[in-house]
């Protein structure tokens, strides 16, 4: 694949991967009480602390991927967020929706691992800072 197409595909991939985290973080900001109520119903303690942590990890990770800046750090933040979120909220495999959500989270974690391994691609702030080598 030529470098221009590769760069464009990497940007599109990062934005698509980040969108769910960005919207989820913004939703948590818009409805913190509802989010804490859901977290509490799932047996989570200290929902206020975990809510703030979730918002920070999701927004920082998503913005990092979208901008292609500190992209590997952003991918790692989102992976760290995904592990407990998946284990706590999506392991009721008797519920088909939760099973699908579990598989969706596995797929997103796979995409994040790919970004962690290969970086943001040539069209990113990381590549500009590194002189084209991201």
Image (spheres, rainbow, N blue to C red):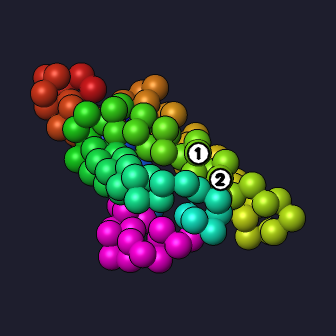
Q: Tell me if I can see residue 104 in this picture.
A: no
Q: Which residues are magenta?
A: 22-38
Q: Secondary structure at mark 2?
A: helix
Tell me: residue 29, above or below residue 92: below
How far apart, in angstroms, are the residues tagged by discs 2 and 1?
A: 6 Å
Question: x and y percent of residue 17 in the render?
Answer: 44, 53
State the residue at coordinates (42%, 75%): 33
State the residue at coordinates (65%, 53%): 88
- Residue occupied by mark 1: 84
Q: Secondary structure at mark 1?
A: helix
Question: x and y percent of residue 74 in the render?
Answer: 34, 39
Quarter-wise, where is residue 100 in the image? Answer: bottom right
Mark 2 vs 1: CB contact within 8 A = yes
Quarter-wise, where is residue 93 in the image? Answer: bottom right
Q: Is residue 24 found inside the magenta-colored segment of the image?
A: yes
Lateral position of residue 40 relative to residue 103, left or right: left
Q: Is residue 47 found inside the magenta-colored segment of the image?
A: no
- Residue occupied by mark 2: 88
Question: x and y percent of residue 97 in the render?
Answer: 73, 70
Question: x and y percent of residue 133 in the render?
Answer: 24, 22
State the residue at coordinates (32%, 51%): 56
Tell me: residue 79, above or below residue 58: above
**Dominant secondary structure of the magenta stretch?**
helix
Query: Which residue is nearer to you in this view: 4 or 125?
Result: 125
State the residue at coordinates (25%, 34%): 70
């Amino acid at each position: 694949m030529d470098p221009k197409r590769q760069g464009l595909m990497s940007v599109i991939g990062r934005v698509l991967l980040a969108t769910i985290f960005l919207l989820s973080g913004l939703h948590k900001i818009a409805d913190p009480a509802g989010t804490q109520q859901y977290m509490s119903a799932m047996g989570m303690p200290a929902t206020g602390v975990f809510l703030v942590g979730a918002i920070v990890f999701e927004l920082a990770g998503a913005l990092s991927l979208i901008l292609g800046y500190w992209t590997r750090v952003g991918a790692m933040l989102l992976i760290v967020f995904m592990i407990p979120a998946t284990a706590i909220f999506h392991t009721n495999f008797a519920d088909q929706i939760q099973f699908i959500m579990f598989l969706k989270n596995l797929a997103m974690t796979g995409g994040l691992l790919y970004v962690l391994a290969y970086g943001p691609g040539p069209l990113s702030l990381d590549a500009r800072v590194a002189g084209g080598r991201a």
